[in-house]
Each structure stands twice: as structure tokens, then as C-alpha cells.
Amino acid sequence: MRKRKVGLALGGGAARGLAHIGVLEVLQKEGIPVDMIAGTSAGAAIGALYAQGKDASQIKDLAIKMGRMQFLSLVDLALPRSGFVEGTRIKNLLKSIIGDIKFSDLSIPLACVATDIRSGEEVVISQGSVLEGVRASISIPVIFSAVKWQDRYLVDGGLVNPVPVSTVREMGADFIIAVNVIPDMGVRTQQAKKAKQPGMFQVMLQSIYIATYSVVRSSLERADIVIEPQLTNIGYGDFHRIRDCISQGELAAQESISKIKKQLE
């Protein structure tokens, strides 16, 4: 009997994307194979580390070691052209973690999803520099400067494909595990009534997720397994809650393990 090719679709969500680490930890411990990964924004960054061959526990230790201050130190203000943050520091950090590795050198096939800001087209990067692919995928519009890639200017892939189920399907996966870290819009709205006024970073991200929420739901319908960590009370910029995000990822993944194993038998 032919072994099913398992694809992992990791969605975007800023700090909430750290929950992907917890999901990966559980999948690894339970012996669930991952044959290919497609990632958007935070999902692309964490997916790149795992595809490179890093153990899930190594990625977890790295995230905890970085901490909130390290994440905040990555903001380097730019003259307002295509974004307020120029992104050199983020690129330098990614380079120190990922290195100059090419997609062809990865242990697991990877695709990073970005958006062509001029045409609005989805751009899937799966060749050349992994660093450039991740950098483009995480470039939140207006906050970060657009990234020049070939003859295009790219921004966050969440604008067109927040949870890249279709991308990993096109890569050849016939069993897809999708991880969505964008909480249900209705639940989030109810709990936000007593919240303080949101900052610019949160407003930009919230705008993206409101606009793409229907896309997220329709995308998840095409996945075989959907893992959705409970992250309603964790904000997009709550990088100081790394352990909470990872823990929620672990809990959500553990709830799906028996179903995953049954379907893969």
C-alpha cells in the first residue's frame, strides 16, 4: 500500500505563530511524518527551521532564549517609503539562525507564501535562498518595507493565502494537516470589549485577518486535519508569552493525534 504523503500547512499570526512550535513538538514525539511544509508569515519562519532539520525542542529553546526583548530589538525604523520598519535587523537575525541555505538543501521540501503588492498575486517561493523566501513572507504591509524578489515587490503572504493548504496540496501532499493560529472572529470580538485601545501593529494585523477570515475558513475545509490552538487571549504582539503560545500548540495537537494516526493507518 502506498504511503500517504503528509503535508503541513502553517498559517500566519505574528506572536500567535509561536504555537506552531508546540504543534511540531507533539507531531515529532508521536512519530507523525512530515513530508513537505508550506508556510505563511510566522508559519514560513518556523517551517523553515523545521525543514532545515532542526529538532522541535531546539526551535522551542531558541524561541524562549530570544525572549520578548530580542523580538522588540528587531524593529529598525525607516523613512516612510513602503513601510515604517526597514527590516535589516530581522534579516540579520534570520541569517544567523537559518544561514545562507538554499531550498534545495533542506531536509524537508518547503514553500514560503508571499504576496506581490503590485498585482495582488500569490507568490510561492520554493527555490533559491530560504532566507529571502522567509523575509518576504513575514513582511507585514505598511509595518515592514516590501521585499524586492526578482522583479517583484513582496509582502506578507497572509493577504492572499493565510493558511496555505492549497500550496502544500500543489507540492504533492495527499494528507494535509493545517495549523490555524487566527482565533474565531466572533469569539475574539466578544472578549475584546474590555480591551485597551489597540496600537498600530495590532490594527494592521487585525485589518489583514478581518479581510482574509473567510479565505481562512474555506482553506481549512480542504485540509484533512485542522489544528487550532486556543489563542484568543494572546495578542499578535505578545512575544513575551512564548511559553503560553507553545503550550497551546501542544494541547491542540495532542487532541488531534489519535485522529491523525487513525487516518494514516
Image (cartoon, rainbow, N blue to C red):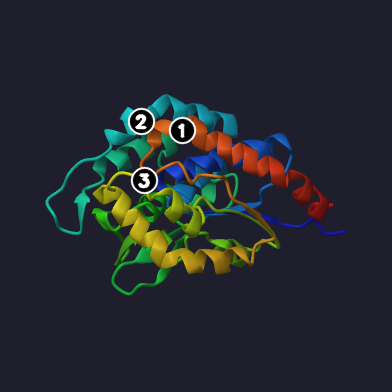
Which residue: 52% across, 59% down?
A: 163
Type of amino acid at the residue the image marks with label 1 = Ile
Q: Which mark is residue 194?
A: 3
The residue at the point 47 percent across, 50 percent down is 44
Using a 10 Å C-alpha cutoff, classify the residue at mark 2 as few (fewer than 14 neighbours), some (14 to 19) or many (20 or more): some
157 up-or-down from 235: above or below: below
x and y percent of residue 80 in the render?
Answer: 13, 55
Residue 243 locus on image (x, y percent): 50, 30
Q: Name which residue type carries label 2.
A: Arg
**Quadrant for the N terminus in the image:** bottom right
Residue indicated by mark 1 = 242
Q: Nearer the viewer, residue 28 or 53?
A: 28
- Residue holding disc 2: 68
Whole-percent x, y for residue 118 in the image: 28, 72
Label 1, label 2: how far apart the Cα atoms are: 8 Å
Kind of element beneath mark 3: loop
Q: Are marks 1 and 2 in contact (CB under 8 Å)?
A: yes
- Earlier residue among tags 1 and 2: 2
Out of 74 and 235, give the one closest to the viewer: 235
Instruction: Provide residue 240's location: percent of width, then percent of height.
Output: 39, 31
